[in-house]
């Protein structure tokens, strides 16, 4: 199985998103570079609106992740509550 990954600008707006991803994906590996944070996960990665909202204590529209998104790898499936990256075989 190949890893899926997502990378964001490393800034105040993306930090709660990254924290939520790590919380919801225990197998994920976080890598920081200057100005960039990349999260790799074996076969699947999920981003949950509910987790982000619990960390920020504010409503969150998942479409906002695209503002700080640099790149991703995997098949993306999204709705109002969750975004998932997978490799479909």
Image (spheres, rainbow, N blue to C red):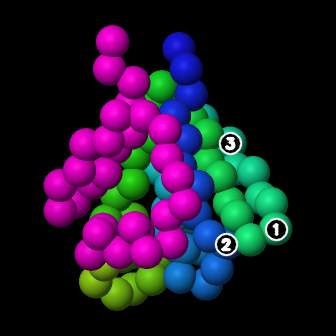
Report the magenta residues as a range: 61-89
Residue plotted at (32% across, 42% down)? 76
**Can you give x and y, in whole percent of width and height, for residue 24 in the image?**
47, 50
Which residue has dot 2 on it?
Answer: 10
Question: What's the CA distance linking mark 1 and mark 3?
Answer: 17 Å
**Can you give x and y, in whole percent of width and height, for residue 49 in the image?**
31, 65
Label placed on residue 34: 1
| Residue contact between numbered discs 2 and 1, judged by CB atoms under 8 Å | yes
**Is 38 a magenta residue?**
no
**Can you give x and y, in whole percent of width and height, for residue 88 in the image?**
32, 20
In this rendering, the answer to whether 13 lies above or below 66 is below
| Residue contact between numbered discs 3 and 2, judged by CB atoms under 8 Å | no
- Residue 26 at least partly seen: no
Which quadrant holds residue 64? Answer: bottom left
Which residue has dot 3 on it?
Answer: 29
Q: Which is more foreground, mark 3 or mark 2?
A: 2
């Amino acid at each position: 199985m190949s890893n899926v990954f997502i990378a964001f600008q490393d800034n105040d707006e993306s930090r709660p998103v990254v924290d939520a991803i790590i919380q919801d994906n225990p197998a994920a590996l976080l890598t920081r570079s200057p100005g960039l944070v990349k999260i790799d996960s074996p076969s699947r990665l999920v981003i949950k609106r509910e987790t982000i909202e619990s960390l920020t204590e504010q409503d969150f529209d998942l479409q906002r992740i695209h503002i700080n998104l640099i790149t991703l790898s995997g098949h993306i499936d999204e709705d109002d509550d969750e975004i998932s990256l997978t490799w479909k075989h």
